[in-house]
Amino acid sequence: MVQNLAYALVQVIHNLGAVAVVGVPVCVLIHTCGDLAVSRRAAWVVLVAWAAQAASGATFGAVSYYFYARPPDLHAIALAALFVKVACAVAGFSLTALCLIMGRRAAPFFAGTKLWRVLAGLGLTAITAAAVLRWFA
Amino acid sequence: MNIKGLIYLWVLLLSAGIAHAQEGSVTILSPLEGAQIMGGQGPHTLDYKVDPGPNGDHVHVYVDEAEVDILRELEGSFPLKGLTPGAHAICIKVVNKAHTPIGVERCVNVIASMRPGGMGKSSSPMPGY
């Protein structure tokens, strides 16, 4: 009961993060192209979302470790999917953080579509890998 | 034994039964411990029956500690293919929804051969697990 609750709470964060890393870039592409202020705020949301994804993903392992003193057992296919997810999280977080740190110099990226297409692609890839990880583990 | 003693014994047995049911269990019906089985493409199956208990969800199959498949049926047969000649440990572990082994597991040690009942030796092992 307690462990299911723990997993469920972590899953809530993970799911919300997944929605944001895909949904926010897609929303920016559809609705706010060119609006720098809105795009920058959206980038902050994406940054927090990728951080939440990474933290909640690690917490899944931590919950398993807390209850059974070992991490989940993953099949080679699932391990590859996990690697893809981690790579997407690192790339998504780094790219967003870099653009936010660059300030005004990143304005063309925020206003254009290239950054948001890449971020949406990373989010979609991560979600696809998550499905493989879930069912091939 | 008086009535009070009988009730005490009944409660004790009941609680032991509940404790056992909560732990879950794995039964490997075939192959048996120490069995000699056909290697390569078989034919041989891992016949099993699992009670996942309250914390278990499904099972993982391992050959020599490497996970080879996921089984979501709690009773059935799994084809043992690609075993190289020699000794192998075949294990079934109950895992939770997060794929973490919960400590309910069973292993059997078998010897795979290239001929039924014999110990085949091969200089080039067949592709296996």
Image (cartoon, rainbow, N blue to C red):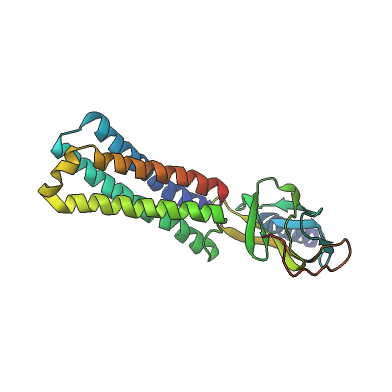
Q: Which residue is drawn at 35% across and 41% down?
A: A121
- Between residues A72 and B31, which one lies in front from this camera angle? B31
Extreme residue toward the top, this view = A31
Residue A126's x, y, as percent? 41, 46
Task: Tell me: residue A75, above or below residue A127.
Answer: below
Residue A2 visible in the snapshot: no
Extreme residue toward the right, this view = B117
Q: Residue at x 71, y 52 (%)?
A: B51
Q: Which residue is drawn at 40% across and 47% down?
A: A14
- Between residues B97 and B18, which one lies in front from this camera angle? B97
Task: Tell me: residue A15, above or below residue B66.
Answer: above
Residue B18's x, y, as percent? 70, 55
Q: Quadrant of residue B33?
A: bottom right
Residue A62's x, y, as percent? 45, 61
Question: In this rendering, would A58 be left or right of B66?
Answer: left
- Between residues B16 and A42, which one lies in front from this camera angle? A42
Residue A76 visible in the snapshot: yes
Extreme residue toward the front, this view = B123
Q: How many marks?
A: 0
Question: In this rendering, would A18 be left or right of A29?
Answer: right
Residue A94's x, y, as percent? 27, 54
Question: In this rendering, would B114 be left or right of A21?
Answer: right
Q: Which residue is drawn at 65% across and 56% down?
A: B68
Q: In which quarter of the image is residue A76?
A: bottom right
- Between residues A51 and B113, which one lies in front from this camera angle? B113
